[in-house]
Every structure is written in structure tokens, then in C-alpha cells.
Amino acid sequence: MAMTVKPWQWGNVPGHEMATPVKGDVVAKLVKAAKRPLLIVGGASLKEKLGGKLLIDFAAELAKAGIPTVATAHVYKALKDRGVEPAAIMTVADVTNRLQDPNWSVDGKGPHDLVIYMGVSYQLQSQMLSTLKHFATHLRTLSLDRYFHPNATYSLPNLKEDEWEQVLNNVIALLKS
Amino acid sequence: MAEKGPLKMSAKELISGLVSAKDVEVLIGRIAMEEEWEPLGPTPFPQISTLRSWDHLLLSRYKPFYAPFCDYCCLCTYGKCDLSKGRLGACGLDMKAQTARIVLIACCIGASTHLAHARHMVDHLIEKYGEDYPINLGQDIAIEMPHARLITGIKPKTLGDLAYLLNYCEKEVTQCLSAAHTGQEGNYIDFESKALHVSMIDHLAMEIADVAQIVTFNFPKGDPNAPLTWIGLGVLDLSKPVVLCIGHNVSAGVEVIDYLEKAGLGGPGETVEVAGLCCTAHDIVRYRDQAKIIGPISDQLRIIRSGAADVIMTDEQCIRTNVVYEAQRVKTPVVAVSDKASYGLPDVSELPVEKIVEMLVSGSTPGVFLPDLEKAGAVVAITAIRMAPLRQKFKIIPDPPQIQAQASGCTFCGTCRRNCPIDLPIDQAVFNAKKGDFELLSMLHDLCLGCARCEQVCPRKIPALSLIEAAFQHKIKTEKYRIRVGRGPILDTEIREVGSPIVLGEIPGVVAYVGCANFPNGAREVGIMAREFARRGYIVTLSGCSAMVASYVRNEEGKTIYEEFPGTFDRGGVVNVGSCVANAHITGAAIKIANIFAKRPLRANYEEIADYILNRVGAVGVAWGAYSQKAASIATGCNRLGIPVIVGPQGSKYRRMYLGRAEDKESFTVYDARTGERVWIGPAPEHLIIALETMEECMVWTAKLCIRPNDTTKGRMIKLTHYVDLYKRIYGKLPPDLHYFVRTEADIPITFKEEIMRYLKEVGWKPWEKPSIDPTLLKRLIRAQV
């Protein structure tokens, strides 16, 4: 499939303002530049495969690079097995709900400025990003999933598996450097 | 309610054909002479804002959480108005109010659908049986219609009383819908209050529809031992003519069966198979258990395209709106009986049966619109018999050898997947099939919702849904399961037995698996969850499509949950109440617990009963595949009554949840009715409606949302045992919010005591000063002011 910045789900066209597609080093720089990023890892990360690994493997590496992490669905155990102790176990609705509050943070260390979603199923993630787009204008959001999310502030475009893997590896490498 | 007509009245005296009375109240042409079965409560026939203060109380704890589907409002000619990021529309509405408005509209659609169903049903039954036909559910059910009693204060006695109650319901739905007009309501909380109101009406309408059909068609009246029947794509004897009923209103299906029996053709399955899809299937087997259930709505296109049906009869709701086109492809004539869904077909009401049959058999019309139900019953039965030899089960699902050829045009463009509601890898499956590998196609059968959106968008016109079915054909014959016929209401005698253990927490909860078939990972998850909670001793109730698919998971001995567990409303019971209008019996059971067990006044006393349920009855609804507006109103009606609901991940597309914040202690304080003190009770229940991601997460939350402030120490210990056990199994650690639920050491599950005590010490937990209170949100229930 060719790369495109149309929403992955054809019907998921929310309005004229859609996410800025980002790729390559830009993603890594965005994450690196964030002062208080938050990584939200969802249940699909236990199923999504890329580069012979699961998405949860990449999420764990990002978390190890120092991004506070929320484990949604039932991914906690898998993160723990990969050496990550998430800052919280919450439902994706619960964490998204709290993120509307400009004073809230998962660890009490100050409000977040960039929220990164990974591995939350496409439709559910799209709805959560919509909430933050409309009611948390103090935040920027980034989807690191393989398919374009128009409701995010920044999203990867629709990617081939190897392109996706490369982006994630770049981010991890830059954050660890 | 005793009420008769025609009437002749004066100011002080009233005389009718059957009664005479003095000093009566006249209500819209009817005379209300409700017997004093209980003193009238504070809110008879509540109007749009009567219970507003209760709604505001609920919503101050469970704040609406919005996830808009679209940045625009496009309901008026000012539009489209971009409401994103805090912008207001041309009418002044903001995004929260607009989203709440859409939720209100959805709930109005849902409620009006059940209500119109009830109206059709009751009017038809009054025509058939007379308005004096009694509401009698047997000696074990004295509280025949808890919603009617609670909401209106009326104790219905006849079909005529039900018609009267429907007048009230229709007025309320109209009021609520009108609030959604441009330039009316503008506040999101008040939109939500109206959504809660109309959804409460929905439960009353469902109760009316189901009770009307139970008493007249002699469905099981709360029988825990209702018979087992068959469900599945493989249940039909295809050597016989097959009638396929699709929809929710069984009145017409009953007429088909009656015709067959009167014509000497025997009951369903003897000479003609009578089968159903979606809720009408539940109800035809409640009428005659020899009829068969094909399955939920997601099986609709599959079974139509399989060619099994020799005639299709549609009534109302959840029907493929292109049913006539799809049926025509397999030469199956359609008889549409509902004026709400007539599909452009010719109205043949005035024609004789023979002529209509001739039109259908000759193919001169793909179908007919025939709202005369008795005539429709005859037409459908005769047409099936005459069509069967002509059609010879003509189908369009290809035989397996044809799959590869039909898949050969696939370019792996991904368009099918990008339009699949649940993002299934259809592209990969079809591409594999092109190369001769059908395994993934076959696997998709159990996950696919059967909507065929993939086919609509395929640039190469590949019939992906039919290919999925073709790849699965070799397994179809094994698709046969046992399901218990919907039993209808819960007996008063059962409530007396379980009221105390439920309220005290010793039965850890009542879990209701309800709703449609938009399942995130296939239907099997509902069956797995239902078995898990039945085995744990929860009372498991089911309805609608969820009740169907729960039978698809067999245990180690090959038994479905309906064979493994008793059908009693008791610890470890698995209770199929029936079709989606039978959902009213699940919420009705919660109401009855408050009334029968706790002796709380029932009559027109909504707030107090809802307050009781919220604080004491550990019931949770799980609509894992909810898709329709009806499911939205059912869930919202549960919420007003104090019952939390979990929806699956697709449920986030309802755009609104009601979420608490556990750390917000003030919002989780109540009055102690004994003293009037405000007391923190922990986040129990934490949310009123939430969309969850995975089955595993859903199981943990199901156990957690059963916790109530009123639990005794023994009850809390039992509930925490299940919560902690599931949490540890799924997350591998203790729940991090245990300190919100452990009030004293006696609450701690013995099995985990040391571990939990260590945790509690770490977080600085101290025993609660007031672990046992009489919790209420209602100031008027305080018995002594501090």
C-alpha cells in the first residue's frame, strides 16, 4: 500500500482540521522536545506484529527511555515482563478523562504536554484523541500506531510494516542517545 | 388500574357501562380509579424535568465524558458549523452540548423504537383479545410490572391499561425529542437529563411490550426451567421448506405458526421449518420451542445468501435495509409486515391470500408489504411450501472450489480493511485465498460482523463476505448449540430468596450480558465472560443477541452455559430473559429487590428506588457488542436507575460515557440516612457507563463495578475476593485501588490477607471511621438531622 495521509478508516473524517502527518526524525524530535510526555499503551499492542516482534516490545523500549507510561487494557503484565513498571494501570477512558484536566499528571510531577498513544485499537483510540482535541487544547497528542489518526495533533501516516518499524526504532534510538 | 368506558359523567358523579363512582379524576377521556394498593409516591407520571434533580445528582458524580465523532453539527441550514476546539455554532451551541444532543437524539430513537414496537403489539393484541384481557403472570409474580408501578404509580390489570400507559410514554418521548430542536436546550447536563428521562421511558415501553406478549401468547412466565432449544447456522433441516423471520416483533411470526397448526401442517419443524434472526427469534421459540434460532443480527446476510430461506418475513428493527435486494439474489420472496419498514414493496392488504402467494411464487414482485398479520401468516406459510421445490435452496455463496477464482482479482489494495467497522484483515485473507490459502478467510467467520461494507467498497467487486462464508462452509453443520428459551420476568419468590444476599453482598453481583452483536473480537468473548461469572457464583442474566452468542462456547464436557448452569435467578444461575424488550425484567428485578426485600415503597417513587439500587444492588450491565440506538437508551435507562454499564470498545462511538474520578472524594460522599452526616463511601460504583478495550479488562471491571457502599463486611470480602483474584490473574499484582474499598480488616479476603495488609500498610491505609452507614444521595431520606 502506498503511503497516504488520508484517515486509515475511510469514514473517519472528523473535519477540515486533521492531524499533521509526521515521520522519520521529526517524530523522534517531537518526543525528545516534550518536557512532560506521557505514553499510553493499549491492548492491541499485544497482537500487533512488526519486524518479528510485538508492538508491546517497542512500547517497552520507549518507556525505558524515560517516558512515564500508562498501561491500559491488560498490558501491564507484558510491560512488567519486559522490565517496565508503568506509572499507572488505567482504562484508556479513565486516563483520557483525566487528561482533560490541565493540572493532572499521572505521577504528580506536573502537567503533561505531549500524550502518545500506542496500541489502542483504531476506533477507540480515534475517539479518545477526539476528546483531547476538543476538550484538552492545552495538550498535543501523537499517535505512534501504523495508521493515520486524523484526531491527533500529530500522527504517523499510513505505513508499511517495515516503515513503521523504522520510525519506532528511530524514536527509541534518539531517546536513548 | 380499573378504568372503563364509554363514559358519561357529571361533576360529582360518574356513570359508565360497568362502573359508577363519585368524586373521580378524569384523565384524557379515561377515568383513573387506581386502587389504593400503596400510598402514592412523590413522582407519578414524571414529566421531562420531574426527576431532573436526581439526574443532576448522578451527573455531579458521574460527569459526562464526550468523544465527538465529528467536528461539525449539520442538523440545520446554518450548518455545517465547526464546533471543534471550543468554537460555537451559529445557534450558540458548543461541542459538549451538541454531543449531548446527539446522545439525546439516539436515546429518543432507541426509546421510540421500543415504544412503537409496544404500541403495535398492544394495539394488535387488543384487537385480537380485547382490552379487558388480564395481565396475569402467574401466582409467583404479584409485582407484574415493576417499571409501570415505579414510574407511573399504576398497577396495570388489562391490555387496555397498557395502552393507556403507552399514551404517557409517547408524550414523554415527544417532549424529549423536541428539546433537540435547534434553539431549544443549550446545556449539556440538561440534554443528558432528558436522555436519562427518555431512557427511563424506554424501560417502561420494553416492559409493556414484553408483558403484553407474555400474557397473550402464553410465553414462559418467569419459568426457571424454560425448555432448551436450538440455535446456530447449522440447525435447519434444509429438506423442508424454511420460513425465516427477521426482526423484533413476533406478532407476525406467531401468525405463521398458528396458520401451520390450524392447517394441519403441525408445529414448527414438522413440515415447515420456522426460524428466526435477532430478537424475533427469541420470541418465536418462547411461543413454540420447536422453532429455531439462527443467530444474532450479524448472521443475517450469511443466512440470506445461503439460500436456506424459502420465504423471508420481516417485521421491525435490526433488519438489513437492502433485504429485498439480497433476498432477490437468491430468489427468496420477502413479506414485510411492519409499516415502519415496508421497503417500497406493493401494499397487497386488499388482495386475497391466493393472489398474493401467486405474485410471490411467480416472481412478479420481489416481495410484498402486508400489514394484515393474520393474512401474512397464511401467505408466508403457503409461499414457503410452494417456493421450496422451485428454489431448491438456490444460493450465491460460492462452493469452496470457486473461492480462488472469485478472489483472483484482489490487488491487496486494503480498501476492504479500511472500511471494516472492526478493522479485520480482510485484504490479507482475500489475497491469501487468491493464492489458494483459505485458512484466514475461514478464521474471519467468527470475527466478522457480517455487514458487507467490504464488498461495497471493493474496486474489483470481490464478494468478500460470501468468500468468508464459503471458506467456512465445511464447518457449518457443527454450528448447533443449545440455548434456554427466554423465561421473561424474575419471580417474586426468587427475589425473596436472593434479595438479602445480593444487598448484603454475599451473592457477589448480578451481571447482565445484553445487547447487539458488534463484538470487538467475535462473539465468543461474551460466552467466556458469562461462564466465568456464573462459575464464580454471580447471577448471570442475558438477553437479545448476547444471550444467543453466549451459547457458542462449550465447556470441557461440551455443554453450553445453558446446559451447564440452572436457569434460576440465584447464585450461579444463568438466566436468559429473552428478546431485547425483555431487558426490562433485568432492571425490573433490581426494582423488585428494593421493594420486595427492602420494603421500599414502589409506587411512583423513582428517586428513592434508584438511590437504593445505586447504593445497594450490585448489578452491572455488559453490552459488549452494543451497536444500536436501542442499546444506547437501554444503557442510559439502566444508568438513571443506578445500574452501571460496560460497553465494548465500539461503544465509544456512542460518543459519551459517565465517568467518576475515584480520587475525587467529595463526589463519592453520601448522606448517612441515620444521622444526616456526609460520609465518603469510596468509588462504589466508580463509573456509570464506560467503554473498555479488552475482555480481560472487562472481567476485572465487572467484578469491581459490583461493589456497593452498603456491602456487609462478609459481602465486601466476597466481592473483593473476586476482584482481587481476577486482577491478580490478569495483571499479576494487587489492584492499586484496594484502599478505596477496604473499610476494615474484616473486609479483606482471607486468601489474600497478608499480601493485602502489606499493601495497605505501604499506602498508609487506616480503618474507616464509619465503615457501616445507611447510604443515600437524597436529603429527604435522612431520618434525623445532625
Image (cartoon, coloured by chain):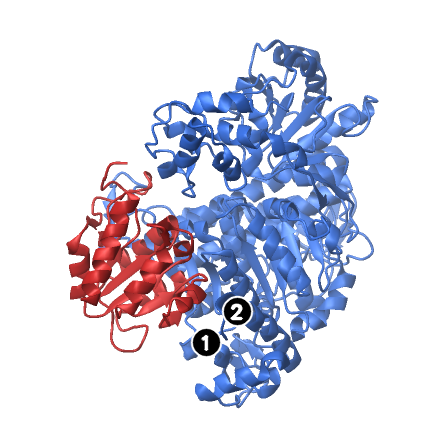
Chain colours: A red, B blue
Q: Amino acid at mark 1?
A: Pro
List x then y, in percent, for residue B694.
48, 56
Question: Answer yes or no: do the residues labelled 2 and 1 have beta carbons within 8 Å?
Answer: no
Q: Using the rendered image of the protein, determine whether residue B444 is visible from the camera's viewpoint.
A: yes
List x then y, in percent, for residue B268.
76, 30
At 68% from the left edge and 73% from the top edge, which residue is drawn? B506
Looking at the rendered structure, which numbered label has been put on residue B620? none
Inter-mark Cα distance, 2 to 1:
10 Å
Circle 2 packing at 10 Å, graded few (<14), some (14-19), many (20+), is many
List x then y, in percent, for residue B718.
64, 75
Looking at the rendered structure, which numbered label has been put on residue B727? 2
Q: How many marks?
A: 2
At 66% from the left edge and 16% from the top edge, which residue is drawn? B392
Q: Secondary structure at mark 1?
A: loop
Circle 1 packing at 10 Å, graded few (<14), some (14-19), many (20+), is some
At 66% from the left edge and 47% from the top edge, which residue is drawn? B551
**Is A142 placed left or right of B31 in the picture?**
left
**Quadrant of the rendered structure where residue B775 is?**
bottom right
Residue B219, compared with residue B292, is above or below; it is below
Looking at the rendered structure, whether the residues under marks 2 and 1 are on a common chain is answered as yes
Q: Using the rendered image of the protein, determine whether residue B184 is visible from the camera's viewpoint.
A: no
Q: Earlier in the sequence, mark 2 or mark 1?
A: 2
Q: Which residue is mark 1?
A: B736
Q: Chain of mark 1?
A: B
List x then y, in percent, for residue A174.
18, 62
Depth check: give the residue in front, B437 or B460: B437
Depth check: give the residue in front, B592 or B187: B592
Q: Chain of mark 2?
A: B
Q: Amino acid at mark 2?
A: Tyr
